């Protein structure tokens, strides 16, 4: 979308669905995302101008689609003239014949097609955005741009990245898609099984940012868009359990956003949150998706994490927490998709069942025998001098130390707790979380 | 323990593409937020973002007499662009902060422990073993 079109005006003309549907249809002809986006942007500008005088047509999206497609056809034809490429109607004209067979409809003419008749190629578009030849960090940016119609500037603001960085990455990725001829065709069933995990990962990437030294943090700025993307995927693949699992996870996490900070901007951990502040609509939707996971008979790591969240949330709501069930879910997550963050959460559950010492023993084991040792190198070698402390990646992972400090406090090992809090605080760069840990550390010192 | 986050980035070329004022303003805001976070965490010592390397003057007495020349010691595409000095407990903490440095989107941060630092009028040896 061009930067100078008024977003509120274009939003009136185009539904949240519209942008991605039209882009997918147009770009599927030649793989040129940037070209399709330019064409649709121009069509939107023209629409705003024309409709201000003539009124909005019954089917604005069908109108926009045709104007944008005609603009692309002009480009394709002139390219065919300039180069020796033969203008091939089967390639360049084939994507839309189902919409208005054989006709070169003049925009604005009567009888525009029903918007629901626009074939939905967005699964192919999502697949292209999450293609293995695109850098994984760029995939979420590409989805927000191509499927959601967000500008580079909006994406940058939402994901806390510099605008120039986002623009450069998007340009590079779109060129790559065009150059590689990455198809937008609907993947067949076996293809889909391979591609879906990448699509899910990219949508999750638009939702949460992973820092090496801190827990994954949701991004507030793109939350609406990622909720939408996760729902879209379940509409496109209604029987895929893990797509529902991802939607459930994102909805349940987003539901708690309003409760993450107190009125004074202080960090509030899940256990201390006021469930009354949670978003009931998002929770209900998340629960719907969890039921769909159950119906599908398959559960993946996103579905498991969503189930873990709902159990924790019902605990906070006073329903009592089913800790043994939580442990079983954590065991499954660790088997399926081991991660240091998951292993630390599992240690916290063990501490609830068998006491703080058991949790501490579990934390200590993370670096030697536990999972999380072979998950990439972080900052080369980090060696600690403190004798009792573990070495390796868990030793520089902030959540390890925050949990350790908490458990040491509960075990009345005050002196060690103080050291662990100090270490957790020094690894925390987020001011609100830092302030929270400092308060807890003072409480631990005074024996509360 | 003092660490320097030494930032290298490609330099803008005369006549080459220049960032828009908006982009500049945004980067300044990100840097301001970052410096504020360092300051509020109590680990901030100093931050200097440097003029382009053409504005450098080099001074040496290697050959015996003082030689002062305009221009950098070695002109490179990626040049030293700035230094943040922080005081944190460990290398891991320094890395955690380096991860959040906004410039890593277009440049590279070297994390280096200080060997000796001149603090309040005297040279202080860094603690060993960190």
Image (spheres, rainbow, N blue to C red):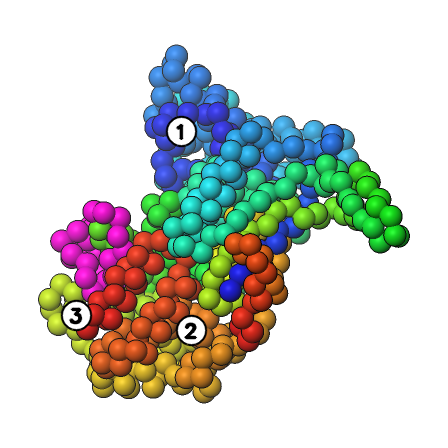
Measured along the vertical axis of the image, is residue A311 above or below residue A62? below
User: Which of the chains bears the disc numbered 1?
Assistant: A
Q: Are marks 3 and 2 on the same chain?
A: yes
Q: Nearer the viewer, mark 2 or mark 1?
A: 2
Quarter of the image for residue A149 reads: top left
Q: Is residue A367 left or right of residue A78?
A: left
Q: Earlier along the polypeptide chain: callout 1 or callout 3?
A: 1
Q: Residues within 10 Å of mark 1 (few under 14, many from 20)?
A: some
Q: Is residue B72 left or right of residue A244?
A: right
Task: Please state which of residues A228 and A420 is positioned toward the viewer in this rendering.
Answer: A420
In the rendered image, residue A270 lying in the magenta stretch gets the answer yes
User: Which of the chains bears the disc numbered 2?
Assistant: A
Q: Which residues are magenta?
A: A263-291
Give the secondary structure at mark 2.
helix
**Residue for point 68% across, 45% down:** B10
Q: Position of residue A257 (x, y in %)?
A: 27, 52
User: Which of the chains bears the disc numbered 3?
Assistant: A
User: Disc number at residue A7?
Assistant: 1
Q: Position of residue A318 (x, y in %)?
A: 11, 66
Tag 3 near tag 2, CB within 8 Å: no
- For mark 3, what is the residue? A448
Does the magenta stretch mainly form a helix, a strand or a loop? Answer: helix
Give the secondary structure at mark 1.
helix
Q: Earlier along the polypeptide chain: callout 2 or callout 1?
A: 1
Q: Are marks 2 and 1 on the same chain?
A: yes
Q: Which residue is most to the left?
A: A318
């Amino acid at each position: 979308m061009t930067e100078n079109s008024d977003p509120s005006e274009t939003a009136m003309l185009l539904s949240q669905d519209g942008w991605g549907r039209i882009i997918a249809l147009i770009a599927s002809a030649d793989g040129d995302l940037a070209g399709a986006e330019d064409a649709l942007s121009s069509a939107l500008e023209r629409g705003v101008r024309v409709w201000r005088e003539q009124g909005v047509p019954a089917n604005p999206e069908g109108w926009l689609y045709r104007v944008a497609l005609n603009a692309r056809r002009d480009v394709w034809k002139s390219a065919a003239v300039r180069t020796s490429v033969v203008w091939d109607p089967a390639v360049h004209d084939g994507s839309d014949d189902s919409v208005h067979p054989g006709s070169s409809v003049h925009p604005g003419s009567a009888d525009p097609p029903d918007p629901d008749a626009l074939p939905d190629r967005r699964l192919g578009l999502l697949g292209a955005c999450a293609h293995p030849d695109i850098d994984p960090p760029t995939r979420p940016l590409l989805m927000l741009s191509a499927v959601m119609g967000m500008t580079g500037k909006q994406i940058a603001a939402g994901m806390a990245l510099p605008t120039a960085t986002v623009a450069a990455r998007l340009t590079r990725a779109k060129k790559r898609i065009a150059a590689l001829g990455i198809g937008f065709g609907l993947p067949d069933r076996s293809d889909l099984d391979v591609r879906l995990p990448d699509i899910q990962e990219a949508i999750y990437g638009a939702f949460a940012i992973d820092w090496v030294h801190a827990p994954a943090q949701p991004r507030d700025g793109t939350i609406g868009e990622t909720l939408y993307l996760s729902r879209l995927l379940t509409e496109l693949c209604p029987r895929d359990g893990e797509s529902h699992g991802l939607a459930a996870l994102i909805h349940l996490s987003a539901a708690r956003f309003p409760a993450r900070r107190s009125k004074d901007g202080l960090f509030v951990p899940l256990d201390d949150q006021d469930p009354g502040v949670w978003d009931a609509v998002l929770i209900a939707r998340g629960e719907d998706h969890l039921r769909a996971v159950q119906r599908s008979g398959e559960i993946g790591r996103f579905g498991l994490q969503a189930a873990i969240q709902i159990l924790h949330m019902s605990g906070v709501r006073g329903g009592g927490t089913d800790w043994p069930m939580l442990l079983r879910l954590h065991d499954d997550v660790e088997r399926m998709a081991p991660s240091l963050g998951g292993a630390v959460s599992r240690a916290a559950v063990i501490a609830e069942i068998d006491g703080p010492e058991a949790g501490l023993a579990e934390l200590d084991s993370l670096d030697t025998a536990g999972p999380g040792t072979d998950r990439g190198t972080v900052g080369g070698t980090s060696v600690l001098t403190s004798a009792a402390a573990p070495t390796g990646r868990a030793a520089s992972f902030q959540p390890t130390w925050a949990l350790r400090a908490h458990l040491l406090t509960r075990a009345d090992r005050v002196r060690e707790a103080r050291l662990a809090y100090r270490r957790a605080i020094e690894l925390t760069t987020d001011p609100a979380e830092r302030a929270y840990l400092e308060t807890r550390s003072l409480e631990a010192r005074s024996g509360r | 323990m003092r660490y320097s986050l030494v930032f290298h980035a490609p330099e803008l070329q005369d006549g080459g593409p220049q960032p828009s004022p908006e982009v500049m303003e945004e980067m300044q805001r990100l840097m301001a937020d970052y410096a504020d976070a360092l300051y509020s965490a109590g680990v901030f010592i100093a931050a200097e973002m440097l003029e382009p390397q053409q504005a450098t003057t080099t001074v040496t007495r290697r050959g015996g007499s003082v030689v002062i020349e305009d221009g950098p010691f070695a002109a490179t595409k990626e040049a030293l662009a700035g230094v943040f000095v922080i005081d944190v407990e460990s290398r891991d903490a320094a890395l955690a902060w380096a991860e959040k440095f906004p410039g890593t989107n277009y440049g590279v941060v070297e994390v280096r422990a200080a060997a000796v630092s001149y603090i309040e009028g005297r040279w202080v040896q860094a603690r060993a073993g960190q």
